[in-house]
Amino acid sequence: MITTFTGPMHSSKSETMIKYYNKIYNKDSILVFKPKVDTRDEGIIRSKGSSKYIDAICIKELEEIVNYVNEDITNIFIDEIQFMKGSVKTLLKLSIMDDIDIYCAGLNMTSEQEPFGLMPQILAISDKIINTYSSCNVCGRKAIYTYYDGNKESEVLVGDEGYMSLCRRCLRRILIRNGDNRLSKE
């Protein structure tokens, strides 16, 4: 089974995944991965809202996972999967053919409101999708969007600085106020 935790920034995706990890008694049956490009907390998965963390293997592509799998592995956890490269067929094979439960966490969309990296494919192959929500940085309502407040020098900036979680109403207000037409582009 493939389970995916997704939502905007600051919505406890990693924390939720860590809770699932902690429910598994035999830790020797688990492999944990995160993308090398995410240099925050290198080698560990940590939730900003908690002191709990999990040691992780840093990889560039999903295909690297198979190099770590042996007959004792029954669970795989992957954080920040939106940054991963490679083919999601690797995860399908591990889930279906090798009978491994896979847990993924990642942002659903970029701050420009575009599907993020491999997330559309990950969501398509997921047996279970758990949407997590944040609190709107402006009004406190349920936030489902990530917004970058400022000018980005590259398409993706790893980290939290400058990013906000927003509800639909506050995102609309900010886009109109800033004359931001990112949602008008075809």
Image (tube, grey):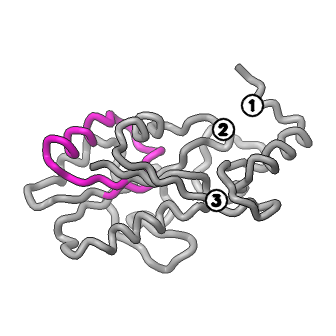
State the residue lying farthest toward the right.
177
- In the rendered image, residue 134, in percent from the top left (x then y), is placed at 64, 61
Instruction: Name the quadrant of the C terminus.
Output: top right
Is residue 16 placed above or below 124 in the rendered structure? below
Give how far apart the Cα atoms at labels 2 and 3 are. Answer: 17 Å
Image quarter of residue 152: top right
State which tag comes first along the sequence, 2 or 3: 2
Category of crowding for the residue at label 2, using alpha-carbon neighbours closer than 10 angstroms: few (below 14), some (14–19), many (at least 20): few
Magenta segment: 77-103
Residue on which disc 3 sits: 160
Residue on which disc 2 sits: 113
Residue 83 within the segment the image draws in magenta: yes
Residue 120 within the segment the image draws in magenta: no
Image quarter of residue 18: bottom left
Residue at 83%, 40% in the rendered image: 175
State which tag comes first along the sequence, 3 or 1: 3
State which tag comes first along the sequence, 2 or 1: 2
Type of amino acid under label 2:
Gln
Badge 1 marks a residue whose secondary structure is: loop
Whether residues under marks 2 and 1 lie with C-beta atoms below 8 angstroms apart, the answer is: yes
